[in-house]
Amino acid sequence: MKGLSRDRWWSVLVLLPSVLLLAVFVYGFIGRTIYVSLTDWGNDPAQALAATPIIRWVGLANYQDLFTGFLQVRFRQELVNTIFFTVFFILGCLGLGLGLALLLDRNPKGEGLWRTLFLFPMSLSFIVTGTIWRWMLQPQGGLNQFPTVFGLPPGSFGWLSSTDAIWQFDWNKLPLLTAVVVALVLVWLAVRALRAADRARAVISGLCAALLLGWALFVGPNVKILPAPELHGFNLALIGIIIAAVWQMSGYTMALYLAGLRGIPEELREAARVDGASEVGMYRHVVFPLLSPITLSAMIILGHISLKIFDLVYAMAGPDNTYTSVPALNMYLTSFRQNQFALGAAIGTILLILVAVVIVPYLRSAFRSEEGHA
Amino acid sequence: MTTTLPTTTAAPTSRKGRVGRIGLYVLLLLGALFFLLPVYLLVATALKTPDAINLATTWQWPRVLNWQSFVEAWAKVGGNLGNSLFLAVTSTILAALLGSLNGYALSKWKFRGAHFLFALMLFGMFIPYQAVLIPLFQFVKALGLYGSIWGLILAHVVYGLPITTLIFRNYYAEVPDALIEAATIDGAGFWSIYRQVVWPLSLPAFVVVIIWEFTQVWNEFLFAATLTNTSSQPVTYALSQLAGGQAVSWNLPMAGAILAALPTLLVYILLGRYFVRGLLAGSVKG
């Protein structure tokens, strides 16, 4: 027993350096970033790189500046870009990855070769991918010239240079829109709770939804966070970057789905066929439901990658193209080119919150189920 | 095929099956086209002379192959490739060794709260590095390591720990506990079990971790751009500078991109199976 406890001490001792390092480098640094984001460090250029800068506490002023400040239009467009980028990137990777996995699951000849082909971009860095696709998407070259190979006229789409946007909305309406969306989610939760006969939860959700909707009806329309209307939407120049990102990452979803498909026992499919299910019906009622946990994992992994992505944008459109920029890129430029550390820290904190919303529930559920097994 | 199955129903399905097979290969070829077109353009452009690069003839294969671009690109990024190699090898070895010990301690010497501790560690794998970049920069500077490759190595080792620990932990979980118990009964302790039982079994996990971590470090850009200066910059940063200018002739960045991509590409082509295993481990379930 004595030896055993000494072994346990060794295991703790072995873990200690890593735990300490991560405690400092992850949690300590996050705390420090949050602190910096609440100061004015670097807002006065003279103080930014001073040996002992005068740093004042300014509370949430940097955040307020980012969301409502006259000079931070770029950041707001970036937030919108990130949302659109994430949605289309995830849809593209899931669709293409699932499609390719379904094809490979039919055991074509040379399966290993196909798989290698679809997955190789994963081994490249976003900088390499970005460099290649930057050339692919030159406004007068690359993809736009591709039709000429078949004797057709060249295309004219402004891949990385377009300044057009679709689905625009007024930033002033953001509180209103947010309130409506949250209220609708609450209504949905209330209905679900009602169906599950959970009256307390239904009443609370319903009340909150009613409050929000009431606010949206009577107060929301008069709330103005900016002096003038400010339109943001889905910039078409992002399409090229989304294609390149899908090119790089869809092999990942393919690998995930293929592993999932191979894990479905053949007997299950046979049983469905014997029961008279058509091929399509078999996929719809047997295969796809079994793949849905994989879809969820893939969405979470891809989602956190897309929220953090910036090297691809940097390499494809350059750091100064505001139409295609993302917060992760802005954070780097604000902090290390303009030396506005507090503002950069605020953007970093916002990014962290976005990623944590996706990742924390995921980690929690992953470890709760594991703890259950143990 | 010499069974008594009625052949009348087999004929239509096989024709349908043949159409299906052709459709399958057509779709696969289309997919392959999407993945290979950029590569064709990359190689074709890298092999053209600067004056042969013109937007209208983008897709033509060069008439004369010009290998000079690779020589020029090597002159510009060769040193950075060396930096990347040193950086990736050193950080990978350190992160793998620490990860192996962590994984062993976490999976074979479970203590209360080990799961929770591990989840806390794992969070470090997912955070956007922008959220720690400013303090990291200050810290590395305070250590006097700013601009040296060692600051970068430190960052990569620390932020590589979650994934290496994860892979080893999941791998060691498969090692039967009975083996460990038998060794304890024979009087072996923490270290002798690691050396004599766990370490000899670890090779496959090391291969996965090394390949995965090497690729990640080689391809990383944010730390490279923030923590180093010209003498110690890895190749991703050098390539971004090479390709970033407006008036560049495109043969040079394309050749540079090939040089920067080759090491990880070769690793992937030669050892793809282990690469995919690391990839799947990244989605937490082992």
Image (spheres, rainbow, N blue to C red):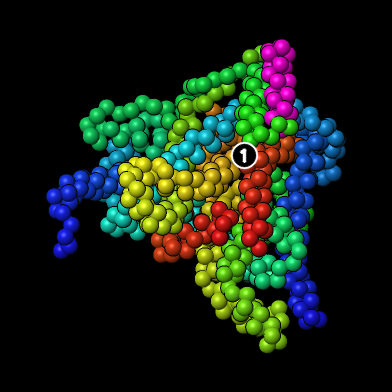
Residue located at (50% from left, 39% from top): A90
Residue located at (58% from left, 29% from top): A80
Q: Nearer the viewer, residue A156 or A297?
A: A297
Where does residue A315 sit, x and y in percent of width and height? 51, 41
Residue located at (72% from left, 52% from top): A26
Left or right for A237, reference A371: left
Q: Is residue B33 above or below residue B94?
A: above
Left or right for A110, reference B81: left
**Image quarter of residue B60:** top left
* Image quadrant occupied by the N terminus of chain B: bottom left
Furthest-bottom residue in this view: B186
Q: Is residue B260 above or below residue B20?
A: below
Which residue has dot 1 on it?
A328
The magenta segment is: A201-227
Q: Nearer the viewer, residue B146 or A165?
A: A165
Q: Is residue B232 above or below residue B49?
A: below
Q: Secondary structure at mark 1?
A: helix
Where does residue A340 sit, x and y in percent of width and height? 73, 36
**Image quarter of residue A61:** top right
Most common secondary structure along the magenta stretch: helix
Where does residue B263 sit, x and y in percent of width and height? 46, 60
Q: Is residue A213 magenta?
A: yes
Left or right for A63, reference B210: right
Where does residue A254 sit, x and y in percent of width and height? 43, 49
Residue located at (60% from left, 51% from top): B224
Q: Nearer the viewer, residue B100 or A182?
A: A182
Circle 1 chain = A
* Image quadrant occupied by the C terminus of chain B: bottom right
User: In the rendered structure, which amino acid carries the disc numbered 1?
Assistant: Ala
